[in-house]
Image (cartoon, rainbow, N blue to C red):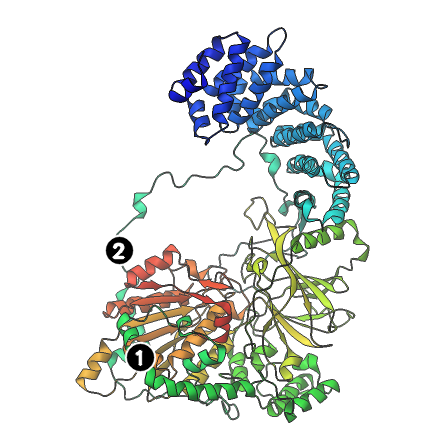
Amino acid sequence: MLSFFEVKSKPKRFPKHLAFRLHNSSDKASILAILQVLSDLLSVGTDRRIYYMISKGGSEALLQTLVDTARSASPDWDILLPLFRLLAKVGLRDKKFGQKALELEALDVTLILARKNLSHSQNLLHCLWALRVFASRVTTGAMLGINGAMELLFKVLSPYTRKHTRKIRVATEVLAALLKSKSNSRRAVNRGYVNSLLRLHQDWHSRDVTNTYVMIRHGLLLCLRHIVALRSGREAFLAAQGMETLFSIAQTCLENKNMELVISAVIQILRQCYPASRLPLVTASSAYTFPAPGSTSSELPCHLTEEDFDDDGDEEMDKDSDVEAMKEDDDLETDMSKLSSKPGLDLPEEEFAQYNAMCPELSCSFEELEPKYGDDLNIKDTLHANHHHIPSAASLRHCFNREPSSWRQDTVHTSILHMVKTGKSSVQSSSKQRSATNVNQSIQQNGLEIDSSGDDTSDIQASLEQAAWDIEAISCPRITASFSNSTKPEESNEAVEKLLHTHAKHIPFHDPHLYLTNAMQTRSAAGGFKTMAFPDLWGHCPPPTAQPMLDRKLGVQRIKILEDVRRLLQPSDIINKVVFSLDEPRPLQGSISNCLRFHSKFESGNLRKAIQVREFEYDLLVNADVNSSQHQQWFYFKVSGMRAAVPYRFNIINCEKPNSQFNYGMQPTLYSVKEALLGRPAWIRTGSEICYYKNHYRQNTATMDGASGKRYYTLTFAVTFPHNEDACYLAYHYPYTYSALMTHLGILERSIDHREVYFRHDVLCQTLGGNPCPLVTITAFPESNSAEHLEQFRCRPYQVITARVHPGESNASWVMKGTLEFLVSSDPVAKLLRENFVFKIIPMLNPDGVINGNHRCSLRGEDLNRQWLFPQAHLQPTIYHAKGLLHYLSSTGRGPVVFCDFHGHSQKKNVFLYGCSMKETLWQAGCTVGESALLEDVSYRGIW
């Protein structure tokens, strides 16, 4: 007989001795001694010993001993009990344990022992431990189900009792493991086990008042969760009033932190069993269409039918398998044909000539560099309030308490950084003092610090209190050739004009008259917008203080899911009235009262439908990207007719992303028209009880090319508005329209010192929608026409900066705005950058998408950031000509040293990500990629 010390001294020999001794020994004492030695060895140290034992045939030896002992005339439980304990320990780490047990007939033996010991709790408990290990593999569990294991377990399960609870808990765990097999779940449905499990759980829940047996209740819920993964299981669950039962249970224990396991399982079952629904839309396609050449949008039916809508499709996978989803292995072998050397140019060199006009600085001819302004801008006193000195970066840092490291970029060469550090201190100190004074005055003038004695503010306040202004008309003024020449239907413009005269506080780098002029020239897929959003026309300033991320309330997501379930179970208070819809041929809100009023037919606006659910709750649906049926995420709309101090809940129910920054502290943005008129024109973060979760709405199969429909997601938030009968705007992020960009470029061009800054505004190309895509060049003039200075100018490397290829990432435009203002400022760093680089800037790569409120695509319904490899001039003009410009610069020997794209995959941090097509394009042009991370609040404030 092997002693414990002998085994420890010869660890590599003991598995062979074990297999031999257990298989051939009939001596009870010897078997017990071996089992004791094994128990001692495997109970200390790491799992390495167990894996070593398994590799040497230890599992087979234990299973064979079990079979031999159980088949004797009188099974010896003195041997079986320690043997079952060892099997439970070893089996958890042996991936083939179930198959070995099946081959050695240990499954049948264990089931027979369990049936014979139903009244002997200790023996039955050990059998259940072994069955739990056997059932952990789906194929083995299916075999146990065929042999009647579930019937046996339901004899063990019982209503609430304080006796033998350990045995009952293990029985629920075994049953849950068995029900992972679809065949077992189907068998459970056919035999009526769904109703039995519900009644058992309800009994344990109602009588376990001290929550002592939470694990038993969780085990029963886990069984139900596996069953309702099948369509037939969900049908049986609903027929047994399972939704009502679990909803009632969730309400009673939602606030109890000790019930976390139960609450989580209940919520998962309720979500799984909530009947899937189609979105309340006539079609999944965008409400707007554009006759783009070669449009990639799929032809969807005008009205969805039952055939277009599909459920999970999980009944198609009837086979029991350990693999939940079969995925194509695309990483087993590398396709060498996909690898190539540096790619050649895909643009004919004869086309490079068209880019000569975009780069006049290459000719070094500076005689006609003064900007030529067109005579078509027939506006009064254009930019009369904005011809002030552009604030320096130092003053902006002083104003917003930013450190220099927060805006200094890695793209500046080391030598330049060294020059800045060593040579700018004396120059910048005085500049800081002057700029700080100017900016502080500017802040006071723009409403960030309100003077209660101001006559204008008090007059406006009195006018608002007397309802002298039609806030509904002012909040969304119509686009006309002149504010003052308004006819009766356009009296709002006269009111706005009056406000512009009385409101002496002007927004830096903004002018309403110039914005109106640009908005009139902007073309949309809807044939042109007739109204403007008040924040874009009036302008806005950043909030006076930084806005921290929202602290997430514990359990808010579950509360909202349960509220959705309550709609299904208790529909008595549901109004379900459509109050706004782009799909309706006539306005809905003229005859609708006692509800909020919505509007989104303005530049960058996106809201397709609004449904009043309850008095203060609305379901909202955003529009898909033009010529598409996907990418519903960006929203921007006006809401009016509200009551102050009343929380309104908004549910945007057709979002597509599987997760969102709204689950991690991000909030929607709000702009109040009354607050703006009172001198506080700012977008602020707003909303409480914010969460983002998967709902019961499904995409139709036509949208998914016949595949099973995926679910939509809900963004829900509550807003308490500051004023009665106000007009407020809500947006996904701080909006930045195409007209705002063109206005900003016009102001910059007229405000800079043209003796110091070379600023040129060209048109890269026309978009599919007929809008010019701006191209900006910024550098410094040579100090003189001497050969030395001209040579220095010729040697300046190019830097190319782009932004806003995805329309919904408006934070990229705010970063670009701050970049432009900094590069033309008098800051010593900006001056040094201009003297050492030529900046080619495309501030908006997808103007059409921005104009039409898209989230990701162009007017053809395609992601332009995936078109860099093979763009076509008539399909993706902005990408085609941006790439052509890079090739042209490279062909002249002036290839950009850095290409930087302002992107915004996350609204709290802009992480620049590049696809393979982007990388290859830059490789062709000989560029390196600039990467950075900029905080969202910084991007809004315009600080680079």
Return the x and y of residue 864 as percentages of the image width and height.
Answer: 44, 61
Q: Which quadrant: the C terminus?
A: bottom left
* Quarter of the rendering containing residue 838: bottom left
On screen, residue 120 above or below 339: above
On screen, residue 108 above or below 332: above
**Is 795 positioned to the left or the right of 634 in the image?**
left
Return the x and y of residue 709 as percentages of the image width and height.
Answer: 59, 47
Q: Which quadrant: the N terminus?
A: top left
Return the x and y of residue 189 as percentages of the image width and height.
Answer: 70, 31
**Is 835 positioned to the left or the right of 522 in the image?**
left
User: Real-space Cα distance between discs 2 and 1?
Assistant: 34 Å
Viewer-closest of 484 and 616: 616
Question: From the viewer's perspective, is the residue at label 2 or at label 1 nearer?
Answer: 1
Which secondary structure, mark 1? helix
On screen, residue 594 above or below 228: below
Residue marked by disc 1: 832
- For the point 50% across and 24% down, which residue is it? 40
Q: Which mark is on residue 342?
A: 2
**Which sits earlier in the primary sequence, circle 2 or circle 1?**
2
Residue 757 visible at all: no
Viewer-closest of 173 and 590: 173
Which secondary structure, mark 2? loop
In this view, which residue lies farthest toward the front? 5
Residue 464 visible at all: yes
Return the x and y of residue 653 as percentages of the image width and height.
Answer: 64, 57
